[in-house]
Image: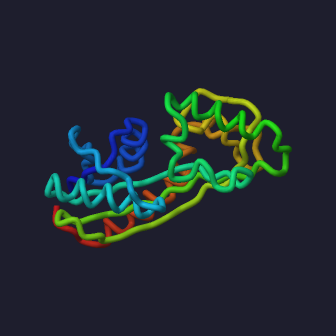
Amino acid sequence: MKLVLATHNPGKIREFSQMASGDDIELLPMPDDLDPEETGATFLENAIIKASAAAKATNLPAVADDSGLEIDALEGRPGIRSARYVPGSDADRRLKILEEMSEVPDGKRQAAFVCAMAFCSPDGAVLNTTEQRWHGTIGFEERGQNGFGYDPIFNLIGRDETSAMITNEEKNTLSHRGQAWREMLDFIRSAELPV
């Protein structure tokens, strides 16, 4: 089955492809010239916008996620603006979070990665949605070289590691995106959709 993955993020494409490797699913990238404006007020609304636009543009089923980091001490920021929290690179965004959290003590640094996912038919209709969370805390410094985005500052609960210090395989098992994609794959397998 050919599916469009509605993202231009190479990190996400790599993660999703690894998790779908045992299935008869070919993940195709979203067309380069397609960049739907994420005007939703929630992760799920943005996922639906992207999946529907990609499905209509390609005439293929499409799946999209909208993911981000919610930090309790920052009243949920960066939230749906995680990828655009400050101009610049992922490193610039991590530095901004660490600066904003510099006075927040241990025990008050709870956070969660959130992933909302939508699956749309070629006509843009929503066939399925899911939302999953991966709970952790924000560290005081960056640690680890694996992953992308906020991984180097996201501490795993009960472990002295960040999500940038574990293998891709373990991250795919634990993460918000891994949980949501597994649930979506279960739906796709059981839905008997046309190939």
Tell me the quarter of the picture where residue 125 sits. bottom left
Say above or below: 140 vs 192: above
x, y percent for residue 192: 24, 71
**Hey, which quadrant is residue 189 in on the image?**
bottom left
Residue 42's place in the image compared with 147, above or below, is below
80 and 27: which is toward the camera: 80
Give x and y (percent) for residue 90: 53, 32
Q: Is residue 135 left or right of residue 190?
A: right
Work out which quarter of the rendered image holds the N terminus and state it: bottom left
Q: What residue is at 68 percent from the left and 30 percent from the top?
A: 142
Q: Position of residue 76 (x, y in %)?
A: 64, 55
Q: Is residue 111 left or right of residue 17?
A: right
Q: Residue at x 16, y 53 (%)?
A: 57
Taking depth in this image into account, of 16 and 117 the one nearest to the observer is 117
Q: Residue at x 27, y 47 (%)?
A: 27
Question: Could you say which is closer to the camera, residue 190 or residue 50?
Answer: 50
The image's colouring method is: rainbow
Image quadrant in which the C terminus is located: bottom left
* Count of numbered circles in the view: 0
Q: Residue at x 14, y 57 (%)?
A: 59
Residue 94 spot, x, y in % from top left: 62, 34
Q: Is residue 178 above or below residue 102?
A: below
